[in-house]
Amino acid sequence: MVFQQSTLAVVLFLLIIALVVGLSCTLIRRSSSPAGYFVASGGVHWGVNGISFIGDYLSAASFLGVGGMIAVVGYDGFLYSIGFLSGWVVLLLLLAEPVRRLGHFTFTDAIDAYFQSRGLRLAAAISTLVVSIFYLIPQMVGAGALVTPLLGVPHYVGVLLVGSVVTIIVATSGMVSTTYVQCVKGALLLVVSLVLVVAVLDRGFVVDGDGVIIPVVATQEKTMSERSMEATGALGPLNYLQRFYASDVYQVRADGDHSVVPDFTRTKSGADILSSGGLFNLDSGKILDRIDFISLMLALICGTAALPHILIRYYTVSSNEAARKSTIVAISGVGLFYLLSLFIGLGAMTSGTINPNDSNMAVPLLAKSFGVVFFAIVTAIAFSAVLGTVSGLILAASGAVAHDIMDRVLGIKMTALEKVSAGRIAAVVVGCVAIYLGLVFEGMNVSYLAGWAFAVAASANLPALLMALFWRRTTSQGVVVAILSGLIVSLGLILLSPEMYMRYGYAAAQAPIQLNHPAIIAMPISLVALIVVSLRGGRVPLR
Amino acid sequence: MIVQQYTSQKLDLLFKAKLQLGIRLLLCFVAVYALFVSLHVYKPQWLALPVAGVSLGLVLGVCLIVSTAVMALVFHLLSCRIERSFADQLQRAFTAEKK
């Protein structure tokens, strides 16, 4: 599927690439030491760090996935936003200060602070790598989805482009350039989302004589002149939601490969769309559907606090107060973004800007319905959104390889410069892996994929991190077992899930375990394993 | 030396005090989140009820998002208060040591 390209979009896209690569090359001198490369020497201002948190966190999964999911399934997509955001509370209230106090460069530093165990370091580094790579998948899939309509190139070219640019950013100046790329991206993303919502509210709805919302943009009215239509005009935020809730909406059907048209034989009430049921089948009475939903919401609230690329941002500020303040900035920004996503998703739904083959395309297509200039700006910024998050993830993974595995586990003696070089080489390798996975998972909703990454992080990292920091009887063996069991069980359940069975070419019903989200099983197993192994003996560290 | 030991003990106490505050607030938030999820699982029809012209689920969801930011701000303000109180105690200890 290849779209028609716009010159302006290409120019903006190239401008963004030139900007971030130029920034990385300019800042290369500030990353010649390991502290500079991995944590920007701990000298980032809390305000900058807060916005960088937003840029780091609001990935393709949020910008494309949540908006796209709301556009396709309605309210159930909004539940992802709530889960994603709630995890920040766990992070701030429990982990921000201890992690900052005990760590230096990586997530592994904090978890190993009391133990000084090689085995633990290796397990935590492997977990960091797996979680980062898992979270890279939705970013790369989102990158391909974005670049396709932007440049008129196939998905694989988009993935290759993003992977290459991000690898250059990280391999040149590490956390310093990553921070500034994320900061600029976070601010731009909020501004563009706000403008997009204003445009959606200004457009209002197109309704027929019976008041049923027709999912078309006003400019398409002429092509559908057989029906009487009128535009509601601009609406306020609450009016928009109330009007939507009180109206029926015509459903859409595919019209070719990448567009939809209204299906005037089917309607769905706004009240139904703004209620649960579009994605989660909780009314079915099936216990497994309920468990799957609880498992997803558990993974989302616990996952954020266990994402290594988010945790390492706490090492980039100079004090606990700065860490808290930057988290508050992040929570406010991310919360605002998710509220805006609700309107963006509903706007895409009622404008009929949905790609039947790829729900990730709803937001860029919505922007396109406002004109090619807006589309070019939105897509270029969404592209920077992918860049920011992917660079954070690759940096976390390269830290796990160079600092945790090569230096602390294998004991390879390296000068500061060699350690930075090792980090850069690791970044290139992880970038290549990310490109490959981005090609394999083409077409899957990126929020859905992110849900898996959160489940793996919540299962492998969170029980181990919490117990290592706060339970005095925890032993290093217990932490290692918790990380590995969480990792193996969550990955195993994902590979055996109905969704993966469909990707293998089998029927979903053939999957041995009818759960798509593993956290509800993997997290308790990880926790129990830690407690049992710790209680069986081993050296309990002094605190 | 005594002041250093005192400072170290105080820092540990400060850390514990903020952690306890964090745990209390987190328990409140988790209870609200769990209630929100439970309503979806066991009483989805309640969440479809109209409130202020939209569904109750949507209203609760927006409230949960706003409460996340409020919770973060409350934690920060209370933590600052605790830190100021500990800083005052340390200052008094230093002054006494000098005398």
Image (spheres, coloured by chain):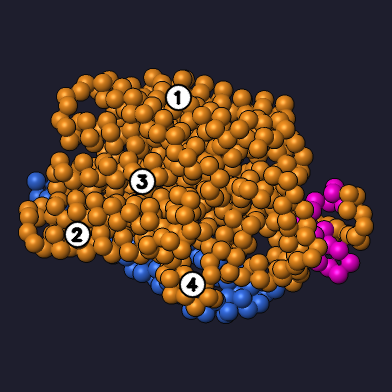
**Which residue does the numbered mark 2 point to in the structure image?**
A530
Q: CA distance from mark 4 to mark 3?
A: 28 Å
Q: Quadrant of residue A492?
A: bottom left
Q: Nearer the viewer, residue A505 or A75?
A: A505
Instruction: Let me know if marks 3 and 1 both belong to one chain.
Output: yes
Secondary structure at badge 1 equals helix
In x, y percent, where is residue A288?
43, 71
Q: Amino acid at mark 4?
A: Phe
Secondary structure at badge 3 equals helix
Q: Amino acid at mark 1?
A: Ile
Of discs 3 and 1, which sits in the foreground?
Answer: 3
Main secondary structure of the magenta stretch: loop
Q: CA distance from mark 1 to mark 2?
A: 39 Å
Q: Amino acid at mark 3?
A: Val
Query: Dot 2: within a 10 Å radius of its alpha carbon, few (fewer than 14), some, or many (20 or more) residues?
Result: many
In x, y percent, where is residue A508?
47, 60
What's drawn in magenta, residue-wise? A204-221
The chain under label 2 reads A
In the rendered view, tell whether residue A253 sits above or below residue A246. above
Q: Amino acid at mark 2?
A: Leu
**Which residue does the numbered mark 3 point to in the structure image?**
A131
Q: Quadrant of residue A230?
A: bottom right
**Which residue does the numbered mark 1 point to in the structure image?**
A168
Instruction: Let me know if marks 2 and 4 both belong to one chain.
Output: no
Query: Dot 4: within a 10 Å radius of its alpha carbon, few (fewer than 14), some, or many (20 or more) residues?
Result: some
Indicate yes or no whether the magenta region holds residue A212: yes
Drawn colour of chain A? orange
Instruction: Let me know if marks 4 and 3 both belong to one chain.
Output: no
